[in-house]
Image (cartoon, helix red, strand yellow):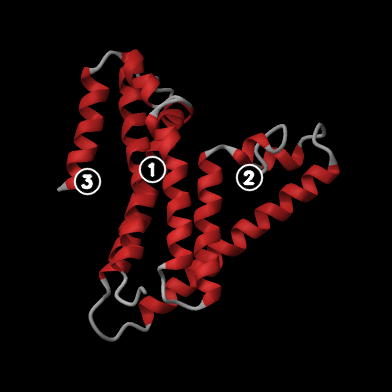
Amino acid sequence: LLIFLYIGISLHTAFTAPLVVTEYLFSEEGAYEVFGPLLWFVLAFLCLVKLKLQFSTRILTALAALMLGLREMDLHKSLFEMSFIKTNFYKSPDIALTDKLLGFTLLMVMIYVLVALAKRFYKVLRNIKQDLDISYVYVVFTIGIAALSKVLDRMTSQLNELFDIQLIRSTQVAIMTAEESFEMLLPVLLIVAVLSYRNFK
């Protein structure tokens, strides 16, 4: 109910408020950009101090949350002349070899952390023999919302590139509103998952 209320308020703002208001809301100074990274950092802290799991798992979850928070701050774009996550970074002749090596190392660390967590979570789900812990439901829910957020993020550009469909500005802003709203839900749901985990200290 709270999620539907939150999304409803965001969409209501997108459709009824002046365009300049909505665009400011999602600008670098807007609430979503300011509070989004902070929520990821809160999650990282809670993963370290609240979860009663293996120490390595706590470190990995905290690292993942920290990396996602830094990504929300666009650190992957500001470290070098372009984002080291994209393949163009490694193809560009304008990027120094040392920067490419550093970017590749950071990218491999990110991939390792995410893959390691995914494998551990999959193993946990496979070995569940009793009732499913509600915290795992929140994690699965988060993954689904993250996928939906990514689809919305690419929708406007893909419609234009693949089908030559140019959406009007108000529709683009509405899609951006939904995407940003879903994106901000991700750390919130994971914080709830951590706090609802049955074995937390």
Q: Earlier in the sequence, mark 3 or mark 1?
A: 3
Q: Is residue 201 left or right of residue 64?
A: left
**Residue 56 screen position, x and y as percent:** 56, 74
Spatial separation of the CA atoms under disc 2 and disc 1: 19 Å
Visible residue check, residue 168: no
Q: Secondary structure at mark 3?
A: helix
Which one is closest to the eye, mark 2 or mark 3? 3
Which one is closest to the eye, mark 2 or mark 1? 1
Label 2 is placed on what type of residue?
Ile
Residue occupying the point 36% across, 37% down = 179
Spatial separation of the CA atoms under disc 3 and disc 1: 12 Å
Residue to which mark 3 is pinned: 3
Q: Secondary structure at mark 2?
A: loop
Q: Quadrant of the C terminus?
A: bottom left
**Residue 24 screen position, x and y as percent:** 39, 20
Residue to which mark 2 is pinned: 85
Residue occupying the point 38% across, 31% down = 31
10 Å crowding of disc 1: few (<14), some (14-19), many (20+): many
Visible residue check, residue 193: yes
Image height check: is 186 above or below 96?
Answer: below
Q: In the depicted view, which residue is nearer to us: 180 or 42? A: 42
Label 1 is placed on what type of residue?
Glu
Label 3 is placed on what type of residue?
Ile
Q: Is residue 79 left or right of residue 158?
A: right
Residue to which mark 1 is pinned: 183
**Residue 150 screen position, x and y as percent:** 42, 43
10 Å crowding of disc 2: few (<14), some (14-19), many (20+): some
Q: Is residue 102 left or right of residue 185?
A: right
Residue occupying the point 41% across, 47% down = 39
Q: Earlier in the sequence, mark 2 or mark 1?
A: 2
Disc on res. 126? none
Occupied quadrant, residue 134: bottom left
